[in-house]
Each structure stands twice: as structure tokens, then as C-alpha cells.
Amino acid sequence: MFHCGMRQMEEKHVANKVDLMVWSNRLDLLALSNFKGEVQVHRLHWQKVWNLPPPKEGVTVQAMAWRPDGKALAIGYSSGTVCIVDIEDKEIIDKYDFACEMTEELYSANDYGIPCISWTVKSGTLESAVEYNLYDDASIFLPKAPSPSTSYKSQVPEDTTKTLKESVDNTQLSMLMIAFGSGSIYLSVFGRYPYGIIHLSQITKDECGEYKILDIKLSDDFSVMQVLYLEKTSNNIYLSVVNTSVLSGFAEEMFVVATRHGQIVELLSHLDQTMISITEAWEHILLEMDTKMAYYASSVPEGGVSADLLELLMLGVPSDELELFLLQELTAKGLKKFGNSVELSYSTIQKLVLKQLNIVGQSLTYHLSELRGLTRVPDRYKVLGLEEKMVTEAIKASCAFLNKCLELQQVIDVSMRNYKAFFRWLFVVIVRLLDEQTSSEIVKITQQELTHIAEFLYNFDNVQVEGSEHSSEKPVKFNLERLGQYLLDQNLTILPDDEDNPWHKFLRENSCLLKDDDTIFPMMDFKKFSLVQQQNYLKNAVRKIFNVKDKDVGKYFSILYNLKCFDNPNNVPSEQFKVSQMFDSSEERFLTAFIDTENSTEAICFMAVSIKEKVCSSIASKFIFTSCLISDSDYVQDKKLQILDLQFYSSEFLSVLVKHPSINDSAIFIQVPIKIIIEKSTEFNIKTKSLVFNDKILKVNLSPLIETGVFKVLEKMDGFRIAVSGNRKVAVVLSKSHRKVRVFEMEIDGEEEEDETLDTTSLSHTTHDSVNRSTENQEDIIF
């Protein structure tokens, strides 16, 4: 006897119309979207965890999927954007924009959006994940990078601060599959490492084929993928069984590369945060000094700043404007304060460069070198699309970044020396102008300090933006800061003097060494790069390594069977089809069910494809429900029940929501045993079948076979959509108005159900006359 008791947990009326609903299989959390494009996460008793607004106005949610560990949620928007959201704080872990991928196709993102997202975990644990490998332990060779400085609070979104620790610590491999465009599927390991993009036209060998994917399901061992899709020209539904043994056969390699990718992405994120801290340190403190000097520069002719200060240095007599500026604008007290601020700022930047940028750069070079080592084992890692040449370019970019950090340190050292001399000299000038008495040691200026001051003043009016005369904005007349040019996304204007560098001399004398590109990288190409430009170059070089556009992973997939499932002569829109798939790991078979809700009295189409030993034996059936489900045999009229929605609850039950035959504002929730469906299904030859659900497949009425313990009448609930989870033993029903939801706890035993709810057996077996009686006294019944 089958029994699946239900107990109502909550009933809520919502302010905004609810659209999609998805349960987490690990936690008692429900993700739902509304017609405004917002996504909310609720606990079982309807406590709201958070609310995420849409990325922009007019965008709606088209698909959602939970990461297998329940710690992240993938959200697909009608704009072609997919966001991976951290469940704890709704921060964006990753973001994909497939709209740009679709511009080359015939249909835009608005036509397709993101019709389907699926996230599957591979059964079993990976050897690479559970066994300690001395050679994979980078902590032995690399210093641990300190956390990014929080001295200067960032005003930019913190989505780049999310790390991969949740993913890379997993002992199981997970695969995120995103359908987009006219039949493209994006595959991502852990939802972070981009494995590649395949198109159904590659698999079906129809280059002109245009498809809309309805659902994707991957077997637990990643060896077979089943895709249910709509062929756009005929509007018929097809089912493809795809051989993806490359995913199962190279699971260990995918885990290794995905782990390296995660480490590299985390380091680049750390790099971004450190650069923000350095830039803010410069902007918030040193920029104020620039502003003060720029105020003085605006009161004198162009080039007058250097002229006045050099004249003061040489003759000891300031001009009237300079004297006014020193005594009223700067002042001795303000100058001393600024000197300390500048020194503190330099010290902060120097620590960030030494203790963070250098460590991150070294770690990046190390992990990229590891990645290059993997590319040199082609029999294991070639299928992942890694190219040694691109990895080498990224290593070169990382070395150039480290070299630029060293250059910046030297600039900081020289600038600090010159700044101290400059401030000390100005302080002495102000003291003398005020005729204050002070010790001779303080006012004494050495010849070397005079040289440093002269060198510093020489570039006063030369730190200009190249091409600024062509800019619509007023060019900057004056900039005190040599360091500032390294923090702008433009070429350096004051280049370091490295002509006497012994290493550069050695390379010039032995140019043959530069021919070995894998060992010695020439840095002359990056001489004019600022630190920001060098950082962007590094990020682009790393991005090219993992760029899915350059990968042809589709050649490693092959089609086992491609079946025409459903003939759609009426051209019913794909949105009208309710589809559900799952993989039954115990029986090694795919289960598929769908219904045309436009003609909802039509039968549910069910199919099971067994993949044991890759011999795909298949069965199919059509089944309906009639009003005898809830009536006695003396109930004369027996009509088909309108099917509202369906979803696989587990490998044992298919959850079906049908309209009550006589009470308009009620529905019936049925847990259909899969065993009964399979017993009534017909086996067919998957190799020769031209149309699975043709007229020869008889419709089976399952109502007489359904026991009272597996269905419930839901009073005052004119249902529209359901979401169920067999792992968490929960279900939720959405009303036709989209504004009312009921949450149920499932698989309640008979005694507990009887204690908590009223028995519905009497209601289920009343005559037609008794059903129409007033039910006012039953309005508060819960199930």
C-alpha cells in the first residue's frame, strides 16, 4: 500500500505575484521569483531570508537551480544574464552574460533568455579531493597572502571578494548546465570553472538547426546527458540521449584544473581589492596635497609653479604669490601635518605593495606554472581545452606585473626621499619668512638634499596626461605625485631611468637569450605600462586561458539517440509545456514527464530510458485521471481531470496537481507511484521509433489504481503550480492568482496525519450531491 500523507505548514498571501518556485535539496529553503523579477528565499515556516532585486528594470526570472550543497542559487534572467548568488548574504559569487553570446545567432536574448538551468553532483568521491598530495600543497612553497586591507573602505560592490572555498573543498564534482540561445548549453564545473559550450546542432549534426531547450538532466556518473528540446521550425518536441563519457572519464582532471582555476580567480580577486585599497590611499590623502598645489598653480601662468619654487630655491626670495600661499594656505602647522600624512600614506602603500601585491603576484606565477605543467600532459588534460601558449602568455604577464611592482617600490623610495626633503625645505622657508627662532640643525639643508629638491621640482609641470590638449576637460596643470601615474589606466608619463641597470645591460649584450621565450621574458613591451594597465593585461591574459569561445568541447560528445517525442501540429508555445525530468540512480534510468497545459485534459506523457551498460531500453505511456478518483462507483458522470502541473518528487513518486472536477476553487494533489506508471507502460525500440507518443499508445486511466493515501483534496486552493522535494519531504502549491501559497510537509505517517489534520476520505468518497453542499464549516481544514 502506498501512503504519502501531507500536513499543511503555512498558508500565505503575498504582495507580488509569484512565478517560479524551487526547493533546495539540502536545506529547508524555498527560492521563488515574482513578476517584478525579484528573487526571494524563504524558510519552511515562511520566514524571509533575503530579497534580491532584478539586475535591471523589465527583467524577469526564467529559471533557477540550487547548487547541490545548497549554499548557492543560480538565477537565469530574461536578459540572458545568469547570477550565482551566495545563499547566506545574497552576494553575487559569479555572473555570466549570455546576451553577447546570442548576438551572433538569429534570435536575440529576449526570444530565448535562459530557458533552463540544471545543477548536478557526481556520485562518489574523487581521489584528488580526499587524498593528500604533497606536490599539490602550495602552502609549503608560498607565503600566505594576508587579507586585503580594510583601512580604506571600498565603495564598489563586493562581489569580487567571494572566494571559492565552498567549491574547492568539496569532495564531489558538480556541473552547472545553462541553456541559452538557439540550443546552446554552457557547462561549468562547480559553477565557476568554464568547461565549455556545446550546441545541439553539433550533436544532432544539423548545422542549421534552431532549438529551444526545455530541460537538461545529467546522469549521476556524468556519462550520459538527456536533453528535452523544441525544434523551432516544426515546433515538435525531441529527446536527445547524449554520450558524455568524457565528463566521467576525466572527472579527476576536471577537478584538478577547476581547483587551480579557483585559486587563480581568488588571487585575482585579492589583487583587485588590494589595488582598490592602494588607489584609495593615494586619492584620499595625497590628492588633497595635489589640490592645494593646483590652487596655487591656477593663480600663476602656466609653468609658473616650477619657476617660482626654483627661484626660491636658488635666490632664497619667494614671489608675492608664493609667499602668500606659504603663509596663509599651507602654514607651518599645516605643512607639518601634511608631511606626516604623506609619509603615512606612502608607508601604507608600500606595505600593500610589499606584503600583498608581491605575494599575490608570486602565487599567481606559481599556480600558472602548475597549470602549464598540466598542459604538458596532453593525454589527460587536452580534452579540457588548455593551451600551453596561452598559459605561457599569462605567466609572462604575471612576471611583468611583479616587475612593475618592483618598479613601483623604487618610485616610492625615491619619492619619499624627495618628499621629505621638499617638506623640510618648505618648512624652513616658512620659519624664515615668519622670523621665528629655531635651532640651526632644523634649518640646515645639505647639498644632497638640495639636489633631491631640484630633481623633485624639475618635474612639477611635466606630469601631464598625454593627449590632454584634445580632451574636452581642462587639463591638470600640476600634480605633485609621481606615484599617481601608476594608478591610472594610461601610459606612464615619467618613465624610470633604467639605462644603467646591470640586468638590462646584460640582456642587451646577450640578445640570443631572449629567444628562449619560456625562460626569460623581455619586459620592454611593458615599459610604458602603468600598474593598472599591467593588472588589466594580466587579467585579460588569464581570461584567455579559460575562454570558452576558443574551446571546441562539442567534438568530445556524441549522440546515442535522438527521438521525436511529441508532434505539435497546433504550434503550442513552449511556455505551455510543463516538463519534469530526473535520474533514478538505483535503476540507472532517466524519467521524463510532460504535459501540454494548453490542452490540459490531454494525457501526461511519461517515458523512462534505462542506460544500464549503455543499452538504452525504453518504455513510454500516456495516462490520465478522471473524477472517479474522488467519487464512489455510483458516481455516474466520469470526466477527465484537468492537469495543472507536474514534477518528480523522487524516483518513486511523480507529483501531479489536477483541478477538482466539481469545486472550482479547489484542486487535488496526487503523489503518483512511479511503479504503477511503469507497470502500465509499453516498451519500445529506441533505435527505430519515429514518434514516441503517437496515436498507438493508449491512454491509461490511473484513477482506479490510485489509493486514497496518495492524494489530497486542497480546499480553497485553485492551484496553478507546484514545487516539491523528496529529499526534504516538502511541497508548495501556488494558486491561480499567483498571490497565495501553501507549504506542506510530506510523508507524514497515518497516525500523525490524523492528529494534525482532518481525514479527507469522507470528502473524497462523497456523492456528487454531497460535494456541492456548503463547506463553510470546513474553511479552516488544513492538510
Image (cartoon, helix red, strand yellow):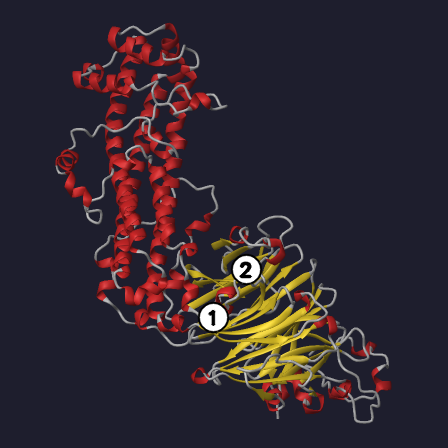
Q: Is residue 384 above or below residue 425?
A: below
Residue 461 quadrant: top left
- Say which mark, if any, is on residue 715: none
Q: Secondary structure at mark 1?
A: strand
- Determine whether, in the image, residue 498 is placed left or right of residue 307: left
- Determine whether, in the image, residue 116 is placed left or right of residue 287: right
Residue 39 quadrant: bottom right
Front-most of residues 473 and 778: 473
The quarter of the image holding the N terminus is bottom right
Q: Is residue 460 above or below residue 571?
A: above
Identify the amino acid type marked 1.
Answer: Thr
x, y (%) of residue 722? 65, 72
- Say which mark, if any, is on residue 120: 1
- Determine whether, in the image, residue 707 is placed left or right of residue 294: right
Kindly tell me whether residue 361 is visible in this rendering.
yes
Identify the amino acid type marked 2.
Answer: Phe
- Say which mark, if any, is on residue 180: 2
Could you classify mark 1 by the number of other residues whose Cα lies within 10 Å: few (under 14), some (14-19), or many (20 or more)? many
x, y (%) of residue 89? 50, 56
Front-most of residues 293 and 577: 577
x, y (%) of residue 771? 83, 83
